[in-house]
Amino acid sequence: GNINTVYGGGKGGTTNGTQDPPTTKGPVSVRLLKGNVNTIFGGNNIYGTISTNIKVSVEGGNVNTVFGGSNGAGAGASKTNVFVSGGTINTAVYGGGKSATTTNSTYVKITGGTFTELDRLGNALNGENLNLESSAEIYGGGEEAAVNGTATVDIDGGVVYKVFGGSNQNGHVNNTVVNNNGGKVLCNTYGGGNVASVGVSNNNLKGTEYTYVMPDGIN
């Protein structure tokens, strides 16, 4: 089936003008096996910080964007974990939230999955320079959200486009660790963020293959 947005947590609202956040007492788990989903959040929507562990697993299906954390700036998460072993990611994977801060740590582990168009992937791996700007990117941080602790990304398998240890458009990440253990990267891997700041970044090269199929055709 087709689903717009999936949340591991709750929505959150207001009662008589006062924030009324949802309560989550145990660990949170979201698992995608099949179907089509626009966006997955491991955390809450509008208000409330989830203090327990969050786990998001993509094992199949088709999803545009995955967030380990929460959505709005009034929401949050403590510790998030995102695992991708299968399925198709069309836009991005974020260990953190969209606008919501992650107060402790984020973790993203890639062992498989499809992050670029299959009909163009073979040509890219054969060395042809293609415009892959529409391919999905991986972030240890959030889209425009901070991570107060450490954001870790492990690339253990799969074929991915770009990897960032930090956040995308905004949101400071205190510390980042990117472990390039295996798989293939078609463009670049960055210890830092896209246009977002980080404190200390660590980009460890341990066995990932780089084909450098740059989006502007420059090797």
Image (cartoon, grey):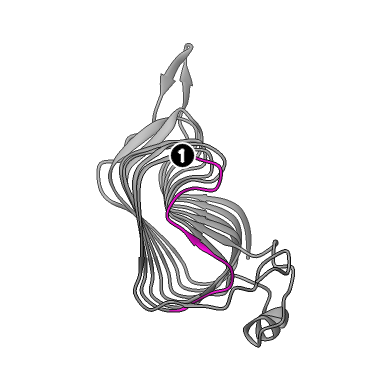
Judged from this view, the residue extending furthest toward the top is: 16
The segment highlighted magenta reads: 183-196
Residue 29, magenta (yes or no):
no
Mark 1 secondary-structure assignment: loop
Answer yes or no: is residue 63 visible.
yes
Residue 22 appearing in the image: no
Give the vertical position of 16 relative to 14 (above or below).
above
> Residue at horizontal 58%, vertical 68%?
187
Viewed as shown, does residue 188 lie left or right of 81?
right
Indicate the amino acid at tag 1: Ser
Q: Picture coordinates of residue 35 (x, y %)?
A: 59, 68
| Residue depicted at 43% across the width and 47% down the height | 96
Quadrant of the rendering where the N terminus is positioned: bottom right
Identify whether 49 is placed above or below 7. Answer: above
Q: Which residue is mark 1?
A: 197
**Left-right relation of 207 to 119:** left
Above or below residue 81? Residue 36 is below
Q: At 62% from the left edge and 84% from the top edge, which residue is drawn?
A: 125
